[in-house]
Image (cartoon, rainbow, N blue to C red):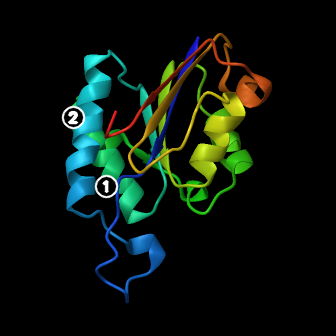
Amino acid sequence: MKTLMLVRHAKSSWDHPGISDHDRPLNHRGRRDAPDMGRRLAERGLVPDRILSSSALRAHTTAQLMAEALGFDVDDIIVDERLYAASADEVLRVIGELDNEVGTAMVVGHNPETASLAHRFSRDVGEMPTCAVAVFTFEEDGWYELDNAEPKSVLVETPRS
């Protein structure tokens, strides 16, 4: 069994027009929502064995805040530049490289690729607002097998749900 948590980064700030897209920080709401979502996942027993994050500041900060709330060591977050400005297929390729010993993985990224990949797995997933988490459980043994897999279960949590 594999459990995949797809996370859209928390709300980012647009207060600094001169900053590159890659370096945009979270705003106040994002800094509030990310640990809250981490706590909600922990309450459901959804704690990842591995966290992958886009290299963008807003995604990495989201991953760190969620990790702290989940009791996951922030130093163990894997920052992967391929998850920034990626397609859904590219994100799936990165996931497919995970060690099969990993049972539960969290991937913190961006839209539209996060929503696109979530919709590929299940049409039951609606909009993916900032800091939304789509959790999929698969019966497959290997991460590389998720390409055409149908999830056994689907859960979507948003900051407002």
133 vs 117, left or right, is left
Say which residue appears at 65% left-offset and 57% top-offset. Answer: 86
Figure quadrant of residue 19 = bottom left
Q: Position of residue 100 (x, y in %)?
A: 61, 21
Figure quadrant of residue 146 = top right
Quadrant including the C terminus: top left
The answer to whether mark 2 and mark 1 are in CB contact below 8 A is no
Say which residue appears at 65% left-offset and 18% top-offset. Answer: 151
Residue highlighted by disc 2:
69
Say if 68 sits above or below 29 in the image. above
What SS does tag 1 mark? helix
Residue highlighted by disc 1:
61
Is residue 4 visible from the viewing direction of this image?
Answer: yes
Tell me which label, 2 or 1, sits earlier in the chain. 1
Q: Amino acid at mark 2?
A: Ala
- Between 37 and 128, the one nearer to me in the picture: 128
- Between 104 and 14, the one nearer to me in the picture: 14
What SS does tag 2 mark? helix
Figure quadrant of residue 20 = bottom left
Say if 123 sits above or below 141 in the image. below
Q: Position of residue 87 (x, y in %)?
A: 69, 54
Q: Amino acid at mark 1?
A: Thr
Quadrant including the N terminus: top right
How many marks on residues?
2
State the CA–CA distance, disc 2 to disc 1. 12 Å
150 vs 50, left or right, is right
Q: Which mark is residue 82?
A: none
Say which residue appears at 67% left-offset and 30% top-offset. Answer: 123
